[in-house]
Amino acid sequence: DVKVTQSSRYLVKRTGEKVFLECVQDMDHENMFWYRQDPGLGLRLIYFSYDVKMKEKGDIPEGYSVSREKKERFSLILESASTNQTSMYLCASSWGARNNQPQHFGDGTRLSIL
Amino acid sequence: QKEVEQDPGPLSVPEGAIVSLNCTYSNSAFQYFMWYRQYSRKGPELLMYTYSSGNKEDGRFTAQVDKSSKYISLFIRDSQPSDSATYLCASRLILTGGGNKLTFGTGTQLKVEL
Protein backbone atom coordinates (compact mmCIF):
# COMPACT_ATOMS: atom_id res chain seq x y z
CA ASP A 1 0.00 0.00 0.00
CA VAL A 2 1.11 3.51 -0.78
CA LYS A 3 1.94 5.49 2.32
CA VAL A 4 1.97 9.29 2.23
CA THR A 5 2.79 10.71 5.63
CA GLN A 6 2.30 14.30 6.68
CA SER A 7 4.32 15.25 9.72
CA SER A 8 1.57 17.01 11.69
CA ARG A 9 -2.19 16.42 11.86
CA TYR A 10 -2.90 19.75 13.57
CA LEU A 11 -0.79 22.88 13.72
CA VAL A 12 -1.41 26.30 15.23
CA LYS A 13 0.85 29.21 14.26
CA ARG A 14 0.80 32.99 14.48
CA THR A 15 0.61 35.54 11.67
CA GLY A 16 4.01 36.41 10.28
CA GLU A 17 5.62 33.13 11.28
CA LYS A 18 7.46 30.99 8.75
CA VAL A 19 5.70 27.63 8.65
CA PHE A 20 7.00 24.33 7.31
CA LEU A 21 4.71 21.44 6.36
CA GLU A 22 6.46 18.17 5.63
CA CYS A 23 5.36 15.24 3.50
CA VAL A 24 7.09 11.90 2.95
CA GLN A 25 6.09 9.06 0.62
CA ASP A 26 7.50 5.55 0.76
CA MET A 27 6.75 4.29 -2.76
CA ASP A 28 9.52 5.94 -4.77
CA HIS A 29 6.99 8.11 -6.60
CA GLU A 30 8.33 10.68 -9.02
CA ASN A 31 5.51 13.16 -8.60
CA MET A 32 4.45 15.02 -5.47
CA PHE A 33 1.78 17.66 -4.89
CA TRP A 34 0.51 20.11 -2.31
CA TYR A 35 -3.18 21.08 -2.19
CA ARG A 36 -5.30 23.06 0.18
CA GLN A 37 -8.90 22.10 0.84
CA ASP A 38 -11.51 24.65 1.88
CA PRO A 39 -15.30 24.28 2.26
CA GLY A 40 -17.11 25.16 -0.96
CA LEU A 41 -13.85 25.49 -2.88
CA GLY A 42 -12.67 21.89 -2.96
CA LEU A 43 -9.04 20.96 -3.49
CA ARG A 44 -6.82 23.59 -5.08
CA LEU A 45 -3.31 22.85 -6.28
CA ILE A 46 -0.58 25.00 -4.72
CA TYR A 47 2.67 23.51 -6.09
CA PHE A 48 3.84 20.25 -7.58
CA SER A 49 7.08 18.53 -8.47
CA TYR A 50 7.89 15.90 -11.08
CA ASP A 51 11.43 15.28 -9.89
CA VAL A 52 14.02 16.12 -7.24
CA LYS A 53 14.88 19.83 -7.14
CA MET A 54 12.13 20.52 -9.63
CA LYS A 55 8.98 22.52 -8.81
CA GLU A 56 6.10 24.02 -10.73
CA LYS A 57 3.40 26.45 -9.66
CA GLY A 58 -0.15 25.24 -9.36
CA ASP A 59 -3.28 27.35 -9.35
CA ILE A 60 -2.71 29.27 -6.09
CA PRO A 61 1.05 29.53 -5.38
CA GLU A 62 1.03 33.05 -3.90
CA GLY A 63 2.37 33.14 -0.36
CA TYR A 64 3.85 29.63 -0.60
CA SER A 65 7.09 28.02 -1.67
CA VAL A 66 8.25 24.40 -1.80
CA SER A 67 11.39 22.35 -1.51
CA ARG A 68 12.20 18.91 -2.87
CA GLU A 69 15.77 17.95 -1.99
CA LYS A 70 15.08 14.21 -1.86
CA LYS A 71 12.72 12.11 -3.96
CA GLU A 72 10.62 10.96 -1.01
CA ARG A 73 10.17 14.33 0.68
CA PHE A 74 8.25 17.43 -0.40
CA SER A 75 8.01 20.43 1.89
CA LEU A 76 5.52 23.29 1.74
CA ILE A 77 6.67 26.61 3.19
CA LEU A 78 4.51 29.53 4.21
CA GLU A 79 6.99 32.39 4.09
CA SER A 80 4.98 34.72 6.33
CA ALA A 81 1.79 33.08 7.53
CA SER A 82 -1.48 34.99 7.25
CA THR A 83 -4.95 34.20 8.58
CA ASN A 84 -6.27 33.47 5.08
CA GLN A 85 -3.88 30.54 4.95
CA THR A 86 -5.85 28.75 7.65
CA SER A 87 -6.90 25.58 5.88
CA MET A 88 -6.53 21.81 5.49
CA TYR A 89 -3.34 21.04 3.57
CA LEU A 90 -3.10 17.77 1.67
CA CYS A 91 0.00 16.20 0.18
CA ALA A 92 -0.25 13.65 -2.64
CA SER A 93 2.11 11.56 -4.72
CA SER A 94 1.91 9.51 -7.90
CA TRP A 95 4.20 7.43 -10.06
CA GLY A 96 4.57 7.50 -13.78
CA ALA A 97 6.03 10.04 -16.10
CA ARG A 98 4.61 13.52 -15.61
CA ASN A 99 1.81 12.38 -13.31
CA ASN A 100 0.03 9.99 -15.64
CA GLN A 101 -1.11 7.73 -12.79
CA PRO A 102 -3.65 8.40 -10.01
CA GLN A 103 -2.58 10.43 -7.01
CA HIS A 104 -2.49 9.04 -3.48
CA PHE A 105 -3.09 11.37 -0.57
CA GLY A 106 -1.90 11.78 2.99
CA ASP A 107 -4.34 12.44 5.84
CA GLY A 108 -3.77 16.17 5.82
CA THR A 109 -2.52 18.86 8.15
CA ARG A 110 -5.15 21.18 9.59
CA LEU A 111 -3.35 24.49 9.95
CA SER A 112 -4.72 27.39 11.95
CA ILE A 113 -3.09 30.82 11.72
CA LEU A 114 -4.00 33.10 14.61
CA GLN B 1 -17.99 28.59 -13.89
CA LYS B 2 -16.01 25.83 -12.23
CA GLU B 3 -14.48 23.29 -14.57
CA VAL B 4 -15.89 20.42 -12.51
CA GLU B 5 -19.26 20.90 -10.82
CA GLN B 6 -20.60 18.70 -8.06
CA ASP B 7 -23.66 19.02 -5.84
CA PRO B 8 -22.35 19.38 -2.28
CA GLY B 9 -25.30 17.61 -0.66
CA PRO B 10 -25.63 16.47 2.04
CA LEU B 11 -27.30 13.38 0.65
CA SER B 12 -28.97 11.10 3.18
CA VAL B 13 -30.15 7.59 2.22
CA PRO B 14 -31.31 4.49 4.12
CA GLU B 15 -29.03 1.47 4.38
CA GLY B 16 -29.34 -0.78 1.34
CA ALA B 17 -30.32 2.01 -1.04
CA ILE B 18 -28.70 2.59 -4.42
CA VAL B 19 -26.80 5.87 -4.35
CA SER B 20 -26.13 8.00 -7.41
CA LEU B 21 -23.45 10.69 -7.22
CA ASN B 22 -22.89 12.98 -10.18
CA CYS B 23 -20.50 15.52 -11.64
CA THR B 24 -20.46 17.61 -14.76
CA TYR B 25 -17.38 19.07 -16.39
CA SER B 26 -16.93 21.82 -18.93
CA ASN B 27 -13.52 21.12 -20.51
CA SER B 28 -13.80 18.60 -23.34
CA ALA B 29 -10.02 18.08 -23.13
CA PHE B 30 -10.39 16.16 -19.86
CA GLN B 31 -9.40 12.58 -20.55
CA TYR B 32 -9.33 10.60 -17.31
CA PHE B 33 -11.87 10.56 -14.55
CA MET B 34 -11.57 9.52 -10.94
CA TRP B 35 -13.69 9.15 -7.85
CA TYR B 36 -12.15 9.62 -4.42
CA ARG B 37 -13.75 8.90 -1.05
CA GLN B 38 -12.84 11.06 1.93
CA TYR B 39 -13.76 10.14 5.47
CA SER B 40 -13.90 12.84 8.11
CA ARG B 41 -10.42 13.98 9.19
CA LYS B 42 -8.74 11.75 6.61
CA GLY B 43 -7.21 12.30 3.19
CA PRO B 44 -9.02 11.32 -0.04
CA GLU B 45 -8.56 7.70 -1.12
CA LEU B 46 -8.89 6.58 -4.72
CA LEU B 47 -12.04 4.54 -5.44
CA MET B 48 -12.39 4.36 -9.19
CA TYR B 49 -10.33 5.44 -12.19
CA THR B 50 -11.57 5.38 -15.75
CA TYR B 51 -10.66 6.73 -19.16
CA SER B 52 -13.31 5.93 -21.69
CA SER B 53 -17.04 6.50 -21.92
CA GLY B 54 -19.08 3.67 -20.50
CA ASN B 55 -19.23 1.81 -17.22
CA LYS B 56 -16.54 0.41 -14.95
CA GLU B 57 -17.55 -1.83 -12.08
CA ASP B 58 -15.68 -2.72 -8.88
CA GLY B 59 -17.71 -4.61 -6.30
CA ARG B 60 -20.60 -2.45 -5.16
CA PHE B 61 -19.27 0.58 -7.03
CA THR B 62 -19.88 1.50 -10.68
CA ALA B 63 -18.33 4.51 -12.36
CA GLN B 64 -20.02 5.83 -15.48
CA VAL B 65 -18.63 8.36 -17.94
CA ASP B 66 -20.56 10.04 -20.74
CA LYS B 67 -18.08 12.20 -22.64
CA SER B 68 -20.71 13.42 -25.11
CA SER B 69 -22.66 15.12 -22.33
CA LYS B 70 -19.63 15.69 -20.07
CA TYR B 71 -21.25 13.81 -17.23
CA ILE B 72 -19.67 11.40 -14.74
CA SER B 73 -21.46 9.32 -12.16
CA LEU B 74 -20.70 6.97 -9.31
CA PHE B 75 -23.29 4.39 -8.29
CA ILE B 76 -23.12 2.59 -4.97
CA ARG B 77 -25.27 -0.53 -4.62
CA ASP B 78 -26.46 -1.90 -1.29
CA SER B 79 -25.16 1.17 0.52
CA GLN B 80 -23.75 0.68 4.02
CA PRO B 81 -23.23 3.07 6.94
CA SER B 82 -19.50 2.67 6.30
CA ASP B 83 -20.05 4.38 2.92
CA SER B 84 -20.85 7.62 4.77
CA ALA B 85 -18.17 10.01 3.55
CA THR B 86 -17.54 12.83 1.14
CA TYR B 87 -17.12 11.72 -2.47
CA LEU B 88 -14.91 13.78 -4.77
CA CYS B 89 -14.88 13.52 -8.52
CA ALA B 90 -11.75 14.53 -10.41
CA SER B 91 -10.83 14.97 -14.06
CA ARG B 92 -7.36 14.89 -15.54
CA LEU B 93 -6.06 17.15 -18.24
CA ILE B 94 -2.89 16.55 -20.22
CA LEU B 95 -0.95 19.81 -20.37
CA THR B 96 0.87 21.15 -23.40
CA GLY B 97 4.19 20.67 -21.61
CA GLY B 98 3.46 16.97 -21.25
CA GLY B 99 2.39 16.99 -17.62
CA ASN B 100 -1.00 16.20 -16.17
CA LYS B 101 -3.25 18.23 -13.92
CA LEU B 102 -6.18 17.08 -11.78
CA THR B 103 -9.24 19.26 -11.31
CA PHE B 104 -11.51 18.30 -8.43
CA GLY B 105 -15.17 18.85 -7.74
CA THR B 106 -16.03 20.27 -4.33
CA GLY B 107 -17.35 16.92 -3.08
CA THR B 108 -20.75 15.46 -2.17
CA GLN B 109 -21.34 14.54 1.45
CA LEU B 110 -23.16 11.21 1.78
CA LYS B 111 -24.77 9.79 4.89
CA VAL B 112 -26.14 6.25 4.94
CA GLU B 113 -28.51 5.78 7.85
CA LEU B 114 -29.41 2.55 9.65
Image (cartoon, rainbow, N blue to C red):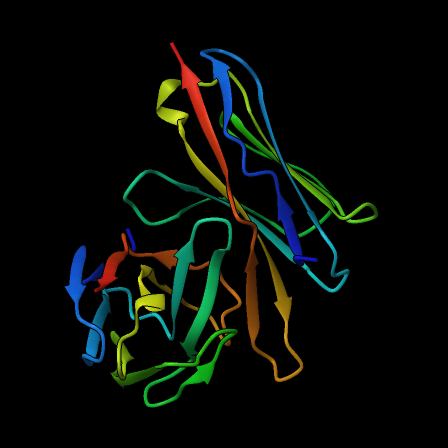
Residue in the picture at 34% in, 70% down? A29
Front in this rendered view, residue A103 or A79: A79
Judge whether A21 appears above or below A86 on screen: below
Q: Position of residue B65 (x, y in %)?
A: 70, 43
Say if residue B108 shows up in the picture: yes
Front in this rendered view, residue B3 or B48: B3
Residue lying furthest bottom: A53
- Quadrant location, the C terminus of chain A: bottom left
Q: Position of residue B39 (x, y in %)?
A: 34, 38
Q: Position of residue A39 (x, y in %)?
A: 44, 49
Q: Position of residue A51 (x, y in %)?
A: 38, 83
Front in this rendered view, residue A21 or B67: A21
How many numbered marks are there?
0
Q: Is A97 displayed left or right of A18 in the figure? A: right
Judge whether B41 appears above or below B10 on screen: below
Residue in the picture at 54% in, 38% down? B8
Residue in the picture at 43% in, 23% down? B111
Q: Is B113 displayed left or right of B41 in the figure? A: right
Say if residue A4 shows up in the picture: no
Quadrant of residue B54 in the image?
top right
Q: Is A3 displayed left or right of A63 in the figure? A: left
